[in-house]
Image: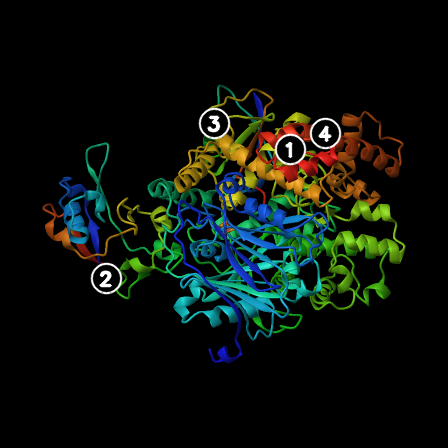
Amino acid sequence: MLITLRPIGHLKELFPANQEKYELELSGTWTIRNIVTKSFDVDPDSISGIVVEGKHRKWDYEPKSGDEILLIPPLGGG
Amino acid sequence: MKIVAKKPELCDGCGICEETCAQAWFKEKDKEKSAIRIMDNPNGDFNIVVCDHCGECVDVCPVEAIKTAKSGIVTIKDSDCVECYSCVGFCPKGAMFKHPEEPVPFKCTSCGKCVKECPTGAIYMEEV
Amino acid sequence: MSEDQARKVIQTFKYEPKRLERGYSDRTLYVNLSDNTVKAKTISEETKDVFIGGRGYGLYYLWQAVTGVTKWNDPENEIIISCGPIAGITQYPGTGKSIVVTLSPTTGTVIDSNVGGYFGPFMKFSGWDALEVQGKAERDVVVYIDGDKGVVTIEEVPLGDLNTHVLAERLTDYYSESENDKKNISVVSTGTGADNSLMGMLNFSFYDRKRKAVRIKQAGRGGIGSVFRDKNIAAFVIKFSNVNGDLNNPADKKRINDTGIKMHKEVASMDPKQNNMRKRGTTMLTPIANDNDLLPVCNFKFGTHPDAVKITKWEDKFCHTGSDGCWYGCTVGCAKVVFGFELRTGPYKGQKVLVDGPEYETIGAVGSNVGVFDRDHILECNFYCDTYGIDTISFGTGAAFIMECYENGILNKDITGGLELNFGNREAVMELLHQIAGGEGFGKIAGQGIRKMKKIFVEQYGANSRFLEDIGMEAKGLEYSEYISKESLAQQAGYGMANKGAQHDEAWLIFMDTVLKQIPTFEDKAEALHFFPMFRTWFGLVGLCKLPWNDVVPANNADTDEPQKVPEHVENYLNLYNGVTGKEATIDDILFESEAVYNFQRVFNLKMGVGKREHDSIPYRSVGPVTVEEYESRQERYDDQLKDLIGVDPSGKSTEEKIKVVREYREKQYEILVDTVYKRRGWTDQGIPTLDTLKRLRVDFPDVVGLVKKHL
Ligand code: SF4
């Protein structure tokens, strides 16, 4: 299955290539936690929220093919 | 300076150091008032928590109530404390303590009393 | 203290310092500078019940003081400082905020501005829930509260330079007995910019023991400093010794302590992995804003700029200590400082000074928005705005507006007295600031704020008024703070509907709206425009800073049901509030408290003639592209929207034609959202709270109802 991972704001810096987004081809079942910690070795503590297609999802959510997963840092704004 | 150093593998968890410390500073037996703590590990052995005078709390204190003496020992001046407990939250070793009955946090001053009473040699004074 | 001979005490008022009970003294200090009355007033249980404290108290007292025709510079206008029941506890980050309330010279209605520093907590510990100052002094005076002895005096003291970096230090020295005593003094002051412009602000000081320096935080918005100087106030000074963690006499100290220690642990472990506020302060927002097309560039035309990377990193400039809080116990500690900065311009040229900041807003306002991408310029401007007592936001947004007018030929060198106010001209920006502060040259006009400038430019220089309405970034007369809202309909309304004018502190919804797409429907947006303004208002009722709420979060935040609300922190706040006051309030209870005050403020706007739908309108620059240049800078985005959202084929159309279609669409969207929000808030389609709403919220006082009825 193909999913897109998008780290927002300074979370980008935690991902190896500092890219806007990552397209991943995954086989088998994956939770978002596994994708973030196993595929990227990123500390989940840095992430304040996860949004998939406009909805909040938790760490054990298993994305479907085509999902775009947004990882959000704490963003209070002013 | 001399600080309390530890060999946790020798500790048998008797808690004499905790009692000694609480008695020395607060004239009480309540181990929650000790500045050295013996923590049970799940595998049956013990973890010894005590200040190593790293100075993190000195930085975080907003009122300079915590100072590093010339000797290198870190101490709190009670009368300057504003009870914000930043130091309790920021101590990387978890060795700054707060007791519900005591407004000011407390920590090891390297007095060495606990070391003298330890029956196993799990704690000792070390020059660093 | 050889100056004692020159010190002239005009009035002395002695009082019994009173211990706080559960966060309150239930007393306010009233000072009238026209007749030198000083007295204590009692706050009734009913007032406390509805208005809670902080902004609530400010609004309550101002409402009693002014009528619908009172002007900002009438003696009846008051400046009220209050912080609320939680303020002054030392165990949790962000618990020392004061709210200042007055009638604003640029909006004509109520302004409220929140500020750190030690004044508010010291005022409470001295026995006062609020300070209310009315009237006008004949000559410059200091109002001095000695909270140790229980004495309030109105005095004339030899002052000299009124600019804050000089005056606050002098007064701190003057009223303290030793170096060690300086920590017990807090000064509220401003500077010459407040004398000579309508964008004056107030600096609240605190003494930084580690750096042995007087530090300041700003009540920036809406010209409060100008009111202060109009009353001939040089400073408020307070002295209170022996701060400890128990002075609020809270109902449940342990609950507060446990909550505080838990939070400090969270900040210690999470902040370095998250926003790193402890090292970067709010500057951490700058790169995010630039990356997401939100950083105002050249009067909000664009949201990003290639040179912005030059102003995004500040850590290396800051002089770090481990405790940069603006009140005790703030481990988030965003109050950053640059040490030994050498000034290149102005009256203090060549001196090495301490600069408090910069914060994100200042970087946007006096940097990117005027097209200057230079950190030293930002520091220079930040320093001078602070010491002159000028709001960096109103100055920067105002200067950006002037620059766009200049580049469009509306202004020229004859009018500006030789200033070449092109975007990017840092010398001209600094010169403009010095002129505003000195009340000289073109600065006299620039210091009036955008709303008044628009009128002047149309009437005197023949400017096209519609163009100025489009590009003049103000709402209700208050200059915009520094976010591009074009792509976020919810944020447009967040700015437009904010009670005080265009400030983002009620609602910051840009990310939820545009990046995360969590609030797609009008109803979703309206719900967010209900919850966030109400919850954020509550911070200002009780004395809290917003930043520790959602600029650092617990490790498991993403696994909660509503991560954007940071549920564990909301729980913490209930623990603090209930721990101090002894209430057992729930989240619904506190939202209700806020909603009452919020609606009261809306009615207050109505009283001052600006509380209707027409006053919630916003400049088109904040909604969509005004000019061809702007449209074409994001052509692909707008063309796609034409096709996908509006159903119009962009091919073959001129940019002007496309702008027109986009505009019609976007303006209509805004109106639909306004309708939806009014409904959600229980207001009429003219934006007036209905009598049922006022009744439900228990603010249906006879004069409120009488006023509202006239408009229904
Ligand atoms: S986060 Fe910053 S503004 Fe808020 S209380 Fe702490 S130091 Fe002050």
Badge 3 is on which residue?
Answer: A59
Callout 2–callout 4 Cβ contact below 8 Å: no
Name the chain letter of the residue that bears numbered label 2.
B
Q: How is the image coloured?
A: rainbow
Cα separation between marks 1 and 4: 18 Å
Callout 3–callout 1 Cβ contact below 8 Å: no
Residue at 71% x, 50% y: name it: C108
Name the chain letter of the residue that bears numbered label 4.
C
Cα separation between marks 3 and 1: 22 Å
Q: Is residue C316 above or below residue C24?
A: below
Q: Nearer the viewer, mark 2 or mark 1?
A: 1
Three-letter amino acid code of the residue under disc 4: Asp
Cα separation between marks 2 and 4: 71 Å
The disc placed on residue C165 is none
Q: Nearer the viewer, mark 2 or mark 4?
A: 4
Callout 1–callout 4 Cβ contact below 8 Å: no
Three-letter amino acid code of the residue under disc 1: Asp
Badge 4 is on which residue?
Answer: C675
Badge 2 is on which residue?
Answer: B1
Q: Is residue B30 above or below residue C677?
A: below
Query: Which SS class for mark 2?
Result: loop
Name the chain letter of the residue that bears numbered label 3.
A
Three-letter amino acid code of the residue under disc 3: Trp
Query: Which SS class for mark 4?
Result: helix
Badge 1 is on which residue?
Answer: C513
Q: Is mark 1 within 8 Å of ligand 1?
A: no
Q: Nearer the viewer, mark 1 or mark 4?
A: 4
Residue at 51% x, 20% y: name it: A27
